[in-house]
Amino acid sequence: MRRRHFFAASAATAVLALSPVLTHSIFAQRGGGAQGASAPARPAPRTPDGKVILGSPVGGERGTWMTVDNRLAIPEKPEEFGDRDATTNFPSGPGVFPKPKVGQVPFQPWARGLFIYRTKHEFEPYTRCKPAGGARMVGTAYGTDFIDVPEQKRIYITQTGGPHSFRPIYMDGRPHPKDMDPTYYGHSVGHWEGDALVIDTVGFNERSWIDLRGMPTTESLHLTERITRPDFNTLRYEMTIDDPEAYTAPWTSGMFFRWAPGAEQFEFVCQDGNLAPILMIGADNKKLDRSSRIAP
Amino acid sequence: MRAKVFCFVCVWACLTIALMTGAQAQEGHPLIGTWSGDWGPSATERTPLLIVMDWKTTTLSGIINPGYPDEAPIRAGTLDSTKWTVHLEADSKDERGNPVKVVVDGKLENIGSLNRTLTGTMTRGSIKGNFKLTRE
């Protein structure tokens, strides 16, 4: 029984570790980029009043969103490559999300230094089951869903991996609170601009990374996310990071998500199942640091 | 009177530490937070050392040994994020109230860890020694 659990945990770990590679590979085999489906994509599902449905369509059709290459910037120089980048090809061409190169990201000097450090010493809080906001919250492992509850005037973004948590987007027109205690996900308000869900978030704490590669952010972060569903199988996620403490100017990146038909979110307990030492501490076990009794 | 001052200093120091420990899992600027350890001219002559640092855009600020008689507000500080070296200059006073210059040169290590370290040399007036600090 124990052995079965061990193998299940190991398999989950392997999938988690390889998910950026696997999703990219699968996606590339289907033609690459957002237009990668072999069959003609259906139009995005809509509500009776014409609003785009970002999550599972009405009627019980099952599926979930899997991220495609959730890096926010493309490395070029040797020091910008992490252990996992060396084995991953970078997609390019039409239909691929236009990400900046790492050298184009307007880092403050300390933030670039920290980002470079993190590419070599992967110590991601998310892999230690900590919540992570922005792109990392949406670009989680095992699938993401969007649940629109018009009666509540809220949209919930739910994640399977990581801390298996959710983020409410307040759609009722409320402003951000004036005095907020910073939190992992911050405070999100949203509105529709045509078919695009635009989310404005402030109030982040500094206890997690905004993406899996460790783009530094501070409590000054103002995040704007723009989410569209250009066809049934494709979700386009764009985010603009405005954080003058970490970057000299706002900058934009994003990713595509692929609809995984038939898949559904499932119970995932990170604290039980995440045995990903490679993601936590780097591929070289000599980097193992257990000096901290509390996960960072 | 002396006891009162001592109590005040203790309470003030405890409050400072308690407030700063709220930012334990700090993934932002790696210098922000409370750093504790010791320093001294030799392995046997050591004195507790506490540095509280903050960073705003391009400016480092903070206090060395806040709440203690040798308290020294940081006047200037730089971080070289290509080598992770830190240089601090602070102004303090000796027992007679005369100005004393404090200079700290250190290197950040184990940056990804909650308990990252800062080690190097510190000069306080005519006393030169080494220090090791761990972020709390």
Image (spheres, grey):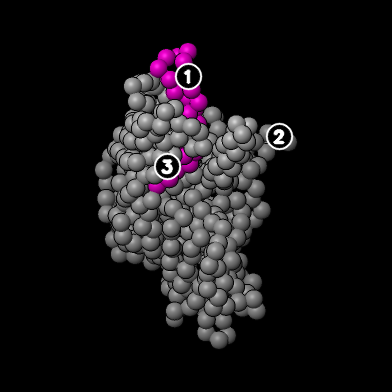
Q: Which residue was labeled with disc 2?
A: A2
Element type at mark 3: strand
| Local crowd size for mark 2, using a 10 Å CA cut-off: few (<14), some (14–19), many (≥20) | few
Instruction: Classify the position of the N terminus of chain A by image quarter.
Output: top right
Residue at screen point 55% across, 62% down: A180
Residue A218 in sight: yes
Structural distance between the alpha carbons of marks 3 and 2: 51 Å
Residue at screen point 56% across, 81% down: A47
The label nearer to you, 2 versus 1, is: 1
Q: Chain of mark 2?
A: A
Tag on residue B62?
3
Q: Is residue A53 above or below residue A254?
A: below
Q: Which residue was labeled with disc 1?
A: B46
The residues colored magenta run: B32-55
Residue type at mark 1: give it.
Answer: Arg
| Local crowd size for mark 3, using a 10 Å CA cut-off: few (<14), some (14–19), many (≥20) | many
Q: Chain of mark 3?
A: B
Tag 1 and tag 3, C-beta contact below 8 Å: no
